[in-house]
Amino acid sequence: MNTIAYQQLAANYTAELATIDAELATIFNESVQAIAVDLNEVEFTGWLKAGMQIARNLPDTPQVSINYFRNSKQILHLSDQITVIRCADIALELAHRSPELATSFLQATPFFLLDCKSIDLKTWSDMGSRMCSDSWKSVALAKTFFTLSHHLLERTSTAAFKNLAGVITELSRQSVELATICLQQAAAIFHSLHEDNHLSFLDLAKAMVKNNWVNAWLYFERAPELLRRFQPSESGAFLSLIAAMVNKGCPEPFTLFEEISHALSQIEGIEHGELRHMAQRLVSISPTAAAEFLKSAPFVRERVPRKAMRQWLELGLEKADADIGLKIEAGDKLEAFFRLQSVTADRALALLSGRVEFEQAGNLLRLYGQALAGEKVRVQPISHLVNRGLGWSSETRATTEGTVIYVPPYIDLFGDLNSNLQIFKVCIAHQSGRITFGSFDFQYGEDGTYIKSSVTQRRPVTATKAIVPMQRFFDLFQGRHLIAGLFSLVEDHRIDCCVHSEYPGLRKWLSRVKTHEISQRPRLLELGLRQAFVENLLRASLHHFESIRWPVSLKPMLVSALGALKIVTRPEATIQDTAEIATHLYDLALDIPNIPASSIGDEWIGIEATNLPDEFTRPDVKTMLKATDLTGIAEIDYENPVPPDFYGDLKPELVQTLNALRDNPALEKPTLEQIQAMLENSVEVENVDADTIVEQIEMDTPGIITDATTDEFDAEAEVIPPTDAAEIINWSTYDEWDFRANDYLTAWCQVGERVVVEGKLEYYEETLKRHSGLVRDVRRQFEMMRPESQRLLKNLEDGHEIDLDKAIQFFIDKKAGVGPQARFYSRRDKIERSVAVAFLLDMSGSTDETINDPGTSPQHVSQPGTVSVDADNPGKKIIDLEKESTVLIIEALEAIGDTYGIYGFSGYGRQDVSFHVIKEFDQILDDTVKKRIDSIKPLRSTRMGAAIRHTNSKLLDCPAKVKILMLISDGRPQDHGYGDNRGDHEYAIRDTKQALIESKQEGIVPFLITVDKEGHDYLKEICGDIGYEVVADIESLPHRLPTIYKYLATKA
Amino acid sequence: MDQNFTLIQIEDFRITEQPFYLPLADEVALFESAYNQHLPVLLKGPTGCGKTRFVEYMSWRLHRHVGNRDEDGVPLVTIACHEDLTASDLVGRYLLEGANTRWIDGPLTRAVKVGAICYLDEIVEARKDTTVLIHPLADHRRILPIEKRGELLHAADGFLLVMSFNPGYQSVLKDLKHSTRQRFIAIEFGYPNREQESEIIRKESNCTEEIAKHLAKLGEKVRHLKSHGLAEGVSTRLLVYAGKLIADGIHPLRACLTAVVWALTDDAEVQQAIHEVVLSIFEE
Ligand SMILES: Nc1ncnc2c1ncn2[C@@H]1O[C@H](COP(=O)(O)OP(=O)(O)O)[C@@H](O)[C@H]1O
Ligand SMILES: [Mg+2]
C-alpha cells in the first residue's frame, strides 16, 4: 500500500480528530506519513483504530493520543506492530487511572524499549501503576518511574530494577514524597555502586522500609558516600549483613548503617572481610550484639592486634554461653559486652591487648602507692598534673610533686598484662621512693653521710634571695641547666638503688625496664662530648656499664666521675650526698668541651665497673686533651640527656617551693614575687606564673574547695525543677567520695527530704490480692524465723521458762543460807530483737524500663531462645517490681515485728538529691503509708551515694542494735555531674561503694537487691565484699527474702 | 594413772620463765610505777600488738624483782571477757556437796585474795552490768563485795587490776563506760616501728634476720592502707605467724599470702594490692 492510499484512508479521521484537538490532527497526519511505509494494510488499520480508540475515549485529554501517534514510529522501529497496539491498550488502561500517567508511559516507552532487558512491557507498566494510588502525588511518582526507568535499566540488572520498584511501591504506601526522593536518587546509587551490590543495597532498603521508613530517604541519599567507606569488595556483603540485623530487630536502621560505616572507615580495608564474618556469627544470637561488635571494633582494634580480634569475639561468645547457664539473657549480655559496657569486656580487652590502662588498674595502683608511700599519698594519672599548670608538661612520664604520685595513662611496654602492671608498680615505687627517701628534703649546707658539704666554697651567681634550699643550691651554679640535669641523674640513681634494696621483688622488673630503656638511648657519637660524658653516667645509673664508651685519652675523667657516682649507691647515702656528687660531676663536666663527639679521633673504649675510685678526684683534662688537635672545632649547644621514662621528671626546686606554700613548718612561706623570681630563674619550668601556682596549692587545702563550689551551685541552680510550693523539704548536706582524688569532696551534695504524696489505697490492696499466695508464703516463712530471732532474757524473777542451771544454783544458794533473789526464769522477748531496717528504693528514671526489654529502644524484640522474665506480664517495669517487693516486704516485716522505714530516692544533680519518705521508722503501717506506695514512680537520676549517706544518718538515729540498709535498685548509679559524663560510671560506682563502706563502719549492715540482671556487672564492682543479690523476677522474692533477711539480721 | 598434764590452781599461776618482750617505749617503767602505787592499768591498742605479752612480761618481772620469794611472787590471773560473763563467774558461787553446800571463789576473788595481777582481756566484750562490779576494786577502796556471802574483800597488797581494750572496733555498742574508764591509767600501744618489729618477728619466729626485716617492712606498708577497710592493718601476731611459716620452709610468698593477704581482708581489690606489695618485697 502506498502512502497516498493511507492518506486517503486517514483523511476521514483527520476531520474527526480536528474536532477534538487541532494539534492532534496535525500530529496524526505527520504520523500517518511516517509510518505508512512500514505497515501493510491490515497492520495500518489496526494501528489507526487503536489510536482512534484512545482519542475517542479521551477527548478531554488529547495529549494521550498525541503521544501515541507521535511515538508510534519509534516504538515500531524498536519492536513490532503488535507491541504498538499493546502500548495503546496499556495507555488506555492507565488513562483510567490518570491520563497523565498514560501520557508519560507513552513518552517513556521508546526509551524503555531501547534496552528493556527482557522485561515485558506490561510488567513494566504494572510496576508503575502499582505505585499509583488515588493521590496526584502518587501519579507523579509513577510518572517519574516511567521517565527514569531507562536510566535505571541502563545501570542495573532486571532483578534489581524489579526490587527497586517493589521497595519504592512499598515506601509509597507510607509516604509518596519520600518514595519519590528515593526513586530520584536510585539512578545515582546504581551508578556509583558496583552492579554486584545492587541487590544487597535493595535488601537493606527493603528492610529499612519495613522497619523504620522515616529515614529510608537518608539511606538513598547518603548510601553512595557511606558505602565508599567499606572495602569495595565487601560493601555488598555488609549491606546484606546490616539488612539481616535490621530484619532481626535492630532499631534505627539508618543510624546503624551510618555507625557501622563510620566504624569501618577507621579500620584498614583488608580487615573488613574478617570482621564481617565475625559479626555474621553473632547475628543469629543477637543482631544488636553484632552491631555493637562492629561499632566498637575500631576502639578494640586500636588496642589489640589484628589476630586477636577473633579471640575477642570468642571471649564474648564464651561469656554468653556461661550466662545461658545462669539463665541470664545471653543476647543482652553479649550486647553489653561488645558495647564495652561490662566488666567482663574490660577484662577481656585488657587481656588481649596486654596494655594496662590507668583507668582500669587505677584502684589497685592507688592502693599500692598508698601502701608504699604512706596513707596521705595519692596516685593519679599524669594528665591531672599537666592540667593544673604547675610546670609539668610531659603527658607520659611519671613524676611526683611531693604528695601525689603521677603515672602515665597506660603502659604497653610488653605484650602481656602482668608485665605492664609490674612496670606501673616500678614507676610508683620509684616515685614513692622520692617521697620516702627524701628527694625533696635537701637542706642547705648540711653534710651528707659520706661527703661533707662544700657549698661554702662557692659563691652564689645571683643576687636574689632564695626561698627554698634547693634554689639556694642551684643559685651557686652558672650552668643551671647542667647542674639540674646532673642533680636529677644522681638523685634518680640513688633512689633507684634504694628501691632496689627495699623491694627485692621488683628487681626482676627493674632490670627488664632498664634493658628496655638502654635500647632507647641515643648514639654517643652523635652527641657533644660533654653530653656523651653525661650520657655515659646515665647509662651507669641504669646499671649498664656494657654500653659505656669513652675516648681512651679522656678515660681518667669518666673513671673519676663514675667513682663519684658510685658513692650514691651506698646504703646510707642521702640527698645531701646527691648534691655533693652532682657538684663534683658538674666541675668535671665543665672541663670537657662540648665539641662533637665524633671529632675525637681516639679509640672509644669501655670502662669496667670495678676499680673505680672511692673518692673524688679531679684529673686535669687540659693535659689529656693536649695530644688532640682541637683547633677550629666549635662547641655545640649542650642538652641534658633525657632521663628514662620510669625515672620520670624530677623538679626538686619546684617541689620544695610547693611544699613551702603548703605550710611546711621547715620552710618559710614565700611571697608571690619571690615565687615569680624563682620561676624565672629555674630551669625546671617554662611558662608558669606564680599566681597559678599559689592558686593551685590553695585549691588543695580543704575549705577553699567548698568556696569554689558555691559558684557552681549557682550556675546549676537553673536546672532545678520548680518544686511544689506546698512541699516541705528538709535539706541535709553530705560529702562525696572522689576516687580520683582519693578524698572526700566536702559538703558536696544536698539531700532534700520530702514526704511522698498519697495515691490510692487500691494499689496496695490489689497487689496483696494479686500475690495472695505469695504473701501467705512470705508471712509464713518470716513467722517461722521468729522464735529464733527472739532473744532469750535470762536472770528474770518471772518468765516463761526455768533456766535449770540457774535454778539449781538458786537452791544451793538458798541451802547455803544466802538469800539471793530467785532469778532463774528466762523469757524470750521480742523487744530484745532490736532490728531496724531501712528500705531504700531507687526511683530513678531508669526504673521505668520494662524488665523484659532492657534495651533502650522501643523496637527491641525479644530473641528466640532467651529467657522471658515474667511471661504473663510482659510490660512489667523495674519500678513495678520494686513496688510489689515493697508490699511483700512490709507484710513480712509486720509478721516479724522489726522496725522498718521505707524511703525512695532520685533527684537531679548534686544540689538536689531528693529523698522521699514513704514510711519512717517510728510510723505505724496505716493507710497513709499504703497510699504513698501507690505514688512511687520513676523520677530522675540516681545519685546513690548521697541517698545512702542520708539513710545511714537516719539509721544511726535509730536506737536498734542491729541496723540494716537494704537498697533496692536497678544497680546503675548515674546522675548529672556524677562523674565526668554520663558514661563515666566509675566515679558513681566508687562513691556508692564508699557510702556503703561508711555504712559498715557505722555498724550498719548494707545489702543490695537489684531487680535487673543487667546491673549484675556494676553491682559486683560496687559491692566488693558487701552482700548483694540479683532478683530476676518477683516470684523468687519469697524464697530469697527470708533467707537474705535472716542472714543479715543474725550476721549483724 | 599416768598424768601427762600439770594442774595448777589459777591463783598459783606464775610466769617463772622470762617471756620475750621488747619494750617499745617507757611502758615498763610506767607499769611498774602503777603497780607500786596500786593504780589500775588499761592497755589500749589494736589486736596483736603485744598487750597480752606485755602483761605476761610484767608479771614475770614483778615476780622476779619486787622482792618476793619465788613461790609467792606475783601470780597472773587472766580472764577472757565475753558477753555471758556474769558476776558469779567472776566472784564465785555455791556448789552442792552431798547434802551441804560449799562456796567456791571465782577467779577475780582468788586474784584479790592472793594479790595477783588480774588481767581482764578485751573488757568491752563483757556486759556493762558485769563491768561495774570491778569499780570498787579499781579505786582507792580496793574492795570486792561478795554479795552472796555478805562479805567485803580487801585486796591483798600485790593485787593489780589490768584490762585491755581495743579502741579500733569502737562502736556505740562496744565502748567503755566513762565511769569504768576513768578508774584506770591508760597505756597506749601502737604497732612497733620497723626495727623493733623486725626484732620481735625474728626472735618469735626464728626466721632469718633478712626475712624478719622484710616482714616488718611489709607490716609497715600494709598499715598504710588502714583507711581501706583494713581497720587496723596487719598485727605483729600475723607477721610472726608468717615468719614461723617461712622459718619452717614455706615459701615467703606463700606464707605471706596465707598469713597476711587472705587473713586480713575479703575485699578482692585490697587483697590484690597487698599481694602486689608482698610481691614487691619478696622475690619469687
Ligand atoms: N613488744 C613485743 N615483744 C615481743 N613480742 C611481741 C611484742 N609485740 C607483739 N609481740 C608478738 O605478737 C604476738 C601477739 O601479741 P599479743 O600480746 O597476744 O597481742 P594483744 O594481746 O595485744 O592482742 C605475741 O605473741 C608476740 O609474738
Ligand atoms: Mg591479747
Image (cartoon, helix red, strand yellow):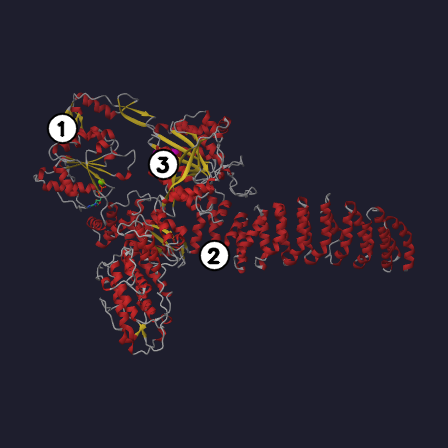
**Which label's residue is closer to the chain start, 2 or 3?**
2
Spot occupied by residue A277 in the image (x, y as percentages of width and height): 54, 55
Q: Nearer the viewer, residue A800 or A215?
A: A215
Q: Amino acid at mark 1?
A: Leu
In the depicted structure, whether residue A52 falls above or below residue A973: below
Numbered disc 2: secondary structure: helix
Check mark 2 vs ligand 1: CB closer than 8 Å? yes or no: no
Quadrant for ligand 1? top left
Spot occupied by residue B58 in the image (x, y as percentages of width and height): 15, 41
Q: Quadrant of the C terminus of chain A?
A: top left
**Disc 2 chain ID:** A
Q: Is residue B145 left or right of residue A469?
A: left
Asked whether residue A1050 is drawn in magenta, I would say yes
Asked whether residue A560 is drawn in magenta, I would say no
The magenta stretch is A1045-1052
- On the image, which quarter does residue A11 sit in? bottom right
Q: Which residue is mark 1?
A: B153
Give neighbour class at mark 2: few <14, some 14-19, many 20+ (Cα, 10 Å): few
Numbered disc 1: secondary structure: strand
